[in-house]
Image (cartoon, rainbow, N blue to C red):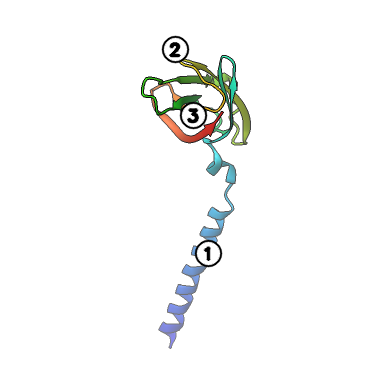
């Protein structure tokens, strides 16, 4: 009987340690899990190109730019209108919290956008070594 009582106590202690460990992970700061996220908001015409509202969060000390690209979705293969914009590292507030930004996208030479066009917008972080992170895409009507 003593060995089965010991086994039950040992199993109970192991289960308690597992529950305490899981609880510690569940109560860890949510901010750390939230960093480096991007959410695309409104996409609109803004002469001479477009503007995109983005909600972002990033780690303190992060050395990335926020990049937005847009491409017109057209059945005409000769109309490949594109636009791009960035927010530089020093203009981002990286403190784990969510922040709003408006990215102005300049069209490439020969590109044009008009009311009613459908565009595919991609936003992501881009670092000094050429890597991109947290890529998000959406299709929007202008």
Vertical placement of residue 97 versus 78, above or below: below
Vertical placement of residue 107 versus 17, above or below: above
Near-viewer residue (95 or 125)? 125
Q: Residue at left 49%, top 24%?
A: 67
Classify residue 79 as left or right of residue 29: left
Residues at badges 3 and 1 in contact (C-beta under 8 Å)? no
Of callouts 1 and 2, the N-terminal one = 1
Residue 19: which numbered mark, if any?
A: 1
Quarter of the image where one finds residue 128: top left
Helix, strand or loop at disc 2?
loop
Q: Quadrant of the N terminus?
A: bottom left
Residues at badges 3 and 2 in contact (C-beta under 8 Å)? no
Point out residue 56 in the picture as x, y percentages from the top left corner. 57, 33
Vertical placement of residue 77 versus 10, above or below: above
Near-viewer residue (67 or 117)? 117
Q: Residue at left 40%, top 21%?
A: 80
Marks 3 and 1, Cα distance to the nearest angstrom?
A: 49 Å
What residue would you read off at disc 2? 110
Point out residue 17 in the picture as x, y percentages from the top left corner. 50, 64
Dot 1 alpha-carbon crowd within 10 angstroms: few under 14, some 14 to 19, many 20 or more: few
Q: Is residue 69 visible?
A: yes
Q: Residue at left 62%, top 36%?
A: 97
Marks 3 and 2, Cα distance to the nearest angstrom?
A: 16 Å
Q: Which circle, 1 or 2, is nearer the viewer?
A: 2
Point out residue 36 in the picture as x, y percentages from the top left corner. 52, 35
What residue would you read off at disc 3? 119
Q: Which circle, 3 or 1, is nearer the viewer?
A: 3
Marks 1 and 2, Cα distance to the nearest angstrom?
A: 62 Å
Quarter of the image where one finds residue 40: top right
Point out residue 74 in the picture as x, y percentages from the top left corner. 43, 27
């Amino acid at each position: 009987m003593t060995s089965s009582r010991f086994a039950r106590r040992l199993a109970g202690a192991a289960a308690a340690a597992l529950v305490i460990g899981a609880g510690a992970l569940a109560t860890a700061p949510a901010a750390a899990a939230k960093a480096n996220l991007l959410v695309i908001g409104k996409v609109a015409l803004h002469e001479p190109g477009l503007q995109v509202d983005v909600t972002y969060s990033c780690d303190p000390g992060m050395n990335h730019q926020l990049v937005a690209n847009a491409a017109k979705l057209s059945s005409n293969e000769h109309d490949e209108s594109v636009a791009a914009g960035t927010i530089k590292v020093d203009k981002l507030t990286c403190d784990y919290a969510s922040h709003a930004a408006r990215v102005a996208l300049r069209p490439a030479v020969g590109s044009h956008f008009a009311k009613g066009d459908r565009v595919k917008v991609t936003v992501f972080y881009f670092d000094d070594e050429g890597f991109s992170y947290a890529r998000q895409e959406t299709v929007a009507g202008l």
